[in-house]
Image (cartoon, coloured by chain):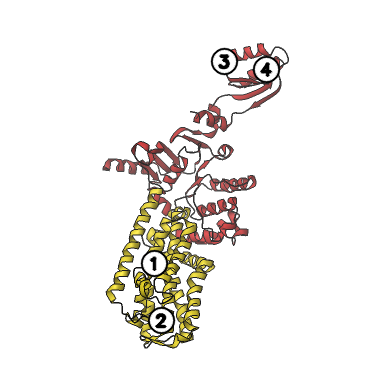
Chain colours: A red, B yellow
Amino acid sequence: MSTAPETQTAAKRGAEPDLAVAVEGLHKHFGLSDRAVKAVDGVDLRIRRGEIVALLGPNGAGKTTTLDILMGLTDPSSGSVAVFGDKPGKAARAGVISGVLQTGGLLSDLTVRETVEVIASLHGADALGRVPEVLARTDLEKIARRRIAKCSGGEQQRVKFALALVADPDILVLDEPTAGMDVTARRHFWNVMRADADAGRTIIFATHYLEEAEQFARRTVVMNHGVIVADAPTAQLRANLGGRTIAATLPATGGDALMQQLQETDGIVDLHVDARRVTLRAADSDAAASALLNAGAHDLEIAAPTLETAFTALTED
Amino acid sequence: MTMSISPTMLRVEATRQIRNPYTLAFTLGMPVAMYLLFGAGMGYGGITAGHGNVKFYIMVSMAAYGAAVAMSSITSLAATEAKQGWGRQLAMTPLSTAGYAATKLVTAVSFAALAVLIVFLAGLLTGAEASDAWRWWASAGIMLGLGMIFGLYGLGVGLFFNSDTAAALASISMTFFAFFGNVFMPLDGVMLDIARFTPLYGYVALSRWPLTDGVLTTGQTDPLWVVVLNVVVWLLVFAALVSLGVKRSRSRR
């Protein structure tokens, strides 16, 4: 590498001390030449300190690979990655970035406390002193003496969360952190996270639960086939999809005429009828609703666009 | 970056081994039980053998077996753990590969020393004798030092096989090697000829050297180069196994 890009990086670092993550032209291929799997195929991503970012995408979209690279667990095939200006591996060892791994394993014959203590001790005396507090925050005190083998999936997930917190990282990476948790555990988990986010920690999480992205992340990055297909504030992502979804039952008479009228209206898309129930998406939902009601349609429902529709639209082939 | 060992990690590693029923049975229990059964409990135990008695001969054999099993089982566990998700957890900490290896090595050597200590104490209490005190220390030193070869063996097995089978395979194969390696019982004839090619033969023969000077129970004498060659060849084989295992586990990733 020549010196030019290095100087550039240094300049950037100086100019943007708040840049937590800077990813440029990231590629990761597994396997050789022809049959190589392009897990990550050109990703650019910049995340500022204190941001909460959801990484959304179907299985195989490249989320886990991207996060593994951020934590220094996998080397990129090409492209540059900087975590507060440092290489990911160095940042991870310094406890600047830490995370809950999707495939991260625990030793089944250790107790919960031993597991957290071992990882904490490796990060130093400060981290070791933080163990009681972290066990309390992750609600593990009561089961601290339990063997990992006897913990439920959700409890093990909380142990992994404790392992990530004990380093007191500036950036917390969560790869499907609530997988295997029941609804109560998930709610508790996100309450703890919210407190963390308010404290100014940068949080990047991958999830399958769309409502987690909607409720928790101000910014959502959608990945598919190894590339970013959308990167926007979560609210905007929803709004950009345009239109609310309207459903209503057609009147006994005049249904065909009504359908004709709706079809000719600008801004109405995805018009479907199934067993006299009409569904559509309208840019001007008020106008569409009053047209339906005036024509005698009943049981009207209006729904805001969900991220799910955004997600489906963005990741459809 | 300094290669540091975490005292917490060492403590937890020791606790784990003590809690592990396989470690207790194979490493700490079996050697001393075998000594008491075939050494202290038998009438021939007091008969003179080399620079000591038969009890000393059997004590050294069993202790050497215990040390080798301790080394191989702990390193096989270390390899399977590192291969799995736990290795990824550790990769996000300042612990280097060298630090991890050092922690496991300290644990393995400690347990090997514990296994030797238990058998030697049993020997001391039941009348194992050598003409000089240094022969005890020399035997213990040789078996603990050379025992690290079986640490390599365990590492290789751990890298090649999955976690559930690796530790058991390492321990059980060591028992098998011990039967056919002139360790548990004195062999003769063709069996002895075969034994000379097995991995525990040279190691145990060298551990007994301070007592026997190479004289076998059959009255034959092994030249030093034969047992040293056995150790060197198996060291190379195990090193090759480890290097193949590393390649294999990398390509799977």
Mark 4 residue element: helix
Residue position marked by numbered label 4 in the rendering: A292
Residues marked 3 and 1 touching at CB (< 8 Å): no
Which subunit holds the residue at mark 1? B
Q: What residue type is labelled 2?
A: Tyr
Q: What residue type is labelled 3?
A: Asp
Label 1 – label 4 distance at C-alpha: 81 Å
Q: How busy is the neighbourhood of tag 4: few (under 14 within 10 Å), some, or many (20 plus)?
A: many
Which subunit holds the residue at mark 4? A
Q: Taking the image as drawn, is residue B5 in sight? A: no
Mark 3 or 1, closer to the camera: 1
Q: Position of residue A191 (x, y in %)?
A: 60, 46
Q: Which amino acid does label 1 sit on?
A: Phe
State the residue lying farthest toward the right.
Answer: A252
Residue position marked by numbered label 1 in the rendering: B150
Residues marked 1 and 2 touching at CB (< 8 Å): no
